[in-house]
Amino acid sequence: MSGTDMSWFAWWSEADWIIRSVFIILVLLSLASWTMMIQKVFQFKNISKFERLVRQYLLGSNSPRTLVLHHPVHVPSVHLAEELPDHAELSELNEFAGQILREKKLDLESGLTLLATIGNSAPFIGLFGTVWGIMHALQALGGVEQISMDMIAGPVAEALVATAVGLMAAIPAVIGYNFLLRKLRRLNALIDGNAVRIVNHWGRGD
Amino acid sequence: MRGPLSISFFLHLAVILLAYFGIPLLPDRDLIVEPPIVVEVVQIDDVSNVPTPKPVTKKPEPPKEKPKPPPPAPKPQPPAPKPEPKPAPEPEPKAEVVPEKKPEPKPEPKPEPKPEPVKPKPRVQPQQVTQKPKPPQRNDFDSLMKDLAPTLKETAKKEEKEQEDLKLDDLAKSIQEAIKQPSKFSDASRPLTITEIDALRQHIAKCWNPPIGAREAENLKIEIEVTMNPDATPRAASIASRTRLSDPFYQAAAESALRAVNNRRCWPYPLSRETYDQWRDLTLIFDPKELLGL
């Protein structure tokens, strides 16, 4: 690695296919995690905005039966108001609402598992590439009598790229996962509150 | 889903493009082609072989350098004679004091010749001694002043330019000397090793990129101790003259010399395996004097 060869992607031409594929996989994982994070942030923002509006609407002593007319159906509590059967016991309604909300919450959770998986596994994938690269570098040194720093430095630096990319994919994924998990918990509380209000209205037969 | 995907795609693309184009461009790595510099070689093991060429190579160098320093010296001198006439009146009152005690005819001839030859000599000599450290300081200051106030010191600029021209001349001459020297001394008692040493000298000089702005470069003599492998590559190299490493300029110069030895592009050295015993341990003396023409 002398002078001009220090550019960032000089290692690519020298790397073997395992390191290259590790690099490509990690870039794809990073792409997926960022896509998921951006999508989830938008989704959570959108739904929590509408859930707040629903809460205001219900606190203003409006009937939940007219909720569907004023709010989009993809919001969980609006969906709940739409799906709830008209004539039922309160215990039945509770069970029904719980089931519907469980489905909706699982929908909201989707993708977070991907982020958690990327955050956990990307460093190990990168580490695998690095170990593989170092293994090959050391194997290449096998028959050499005079070992110089350059014979080790080049391949090891090349192998460490894999770890670097793994960490670059993992760190945003972990941070994003924790951030989104917190957002999701607040959103769930909001949804639960709205659901209780809707079911109570329903039970009273308003 | 398509929106977030494209956002993150362009984000990644931006990061990759920045890494590929932006970051390598930040450091400017223009290499300066350096002229060959004389590197002296001293062998520890085989003392009898080297000392014969060593004094011979050293002797032609200093006389050619010593005549050269005077040209820069007279230029600092012109300002010197100007202040001299001012102190000159000082001795006269002393001379006047003396005649008061002694008869008039004797003091008049004596003080006049004495102050003129005696005083310029001691003054010129200390000036030459003291001005050697001063010029680099002045140059530094002037170069600063150039940037800050270009019109301030026109005379100083002229002097600098002349000195630079002289330095360039000296540099060219020293390069020619360096090229000629090996051929001169290839006829000594043991031609094999001597040509090897000369070849090694030129070879290492090519690899050396000494610090250019070093202060008091004439004193920056760096000794590098090298232990060689049989295949003419250095096994271990260290700075032998460690005592001066506290001086940052010296440290920079020493590290540049160490880099020259450790530069893989210069391996292996042009040494034959038969004479390995003679060059197993080498002491390389790096001397930036020749490059800077001081």
Image (cartoon, coloured by chain):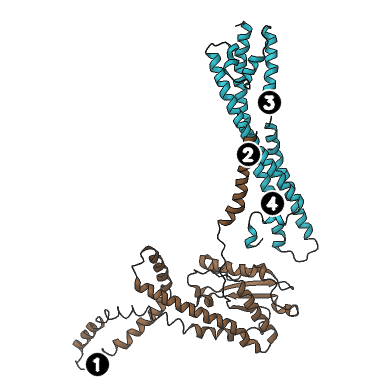
Chain colours: A cyan, B brown
Residue occupied by mark 4 = A160
- Amino acid under label 3? Asp
Residue occupied by mark 3 = A107
Residue occupied by mark 1 = B109
Closer to the chain start, of discs 3 and 4, is 3
Closer to the observer: label 2 or label 1? 2
Label 2 neighbourhood size at 10 Å, few (<14), some (14-19), many (20+)? few
Q: Are marks 1 and 4 on the same chain?
A: no
Closer to the chain start, of discs 2 and 1, is 2
In 3D space, how far apart are the residues under numbered discs 2 and 4 (Cα atoms)? 29 Å
Give the secondary structure at mark 4: helix
- Amino acid under label 2? Ser
Q: Mark 4 — on which chain does it sit? A: A
In the rendered image, the residue lying farthest to the right is: A143
Q: Are marks 3 and 4 on the same chain?
A: yes
Give the secondary structure at mark 1: loop
Label 3 neighbourhood size at 10 Å, few (<14), some (14-19), many (20+)? few
Res A142 quadrant in image: bottom right
Q: Name the residue at 58% across, 15% down.
A: A69
Q: Are marks 2 and 1 on the same chain?
A: yes
Give the secondary structure at mark 3: helix
Residue occupied by mark 2 = B6
- Amino acid under label 1? Pro
Say if B286 sits above or below A3 in the image.
below
Q: Which of these two is toward me, B254 or B242?
A: B254
Give the secondary structure at mark 2: helix
Q: Seen in the image, is B168 located left or right of residue B19?
A: left
Q: Mark 3 — on which chain does it sit? A: A
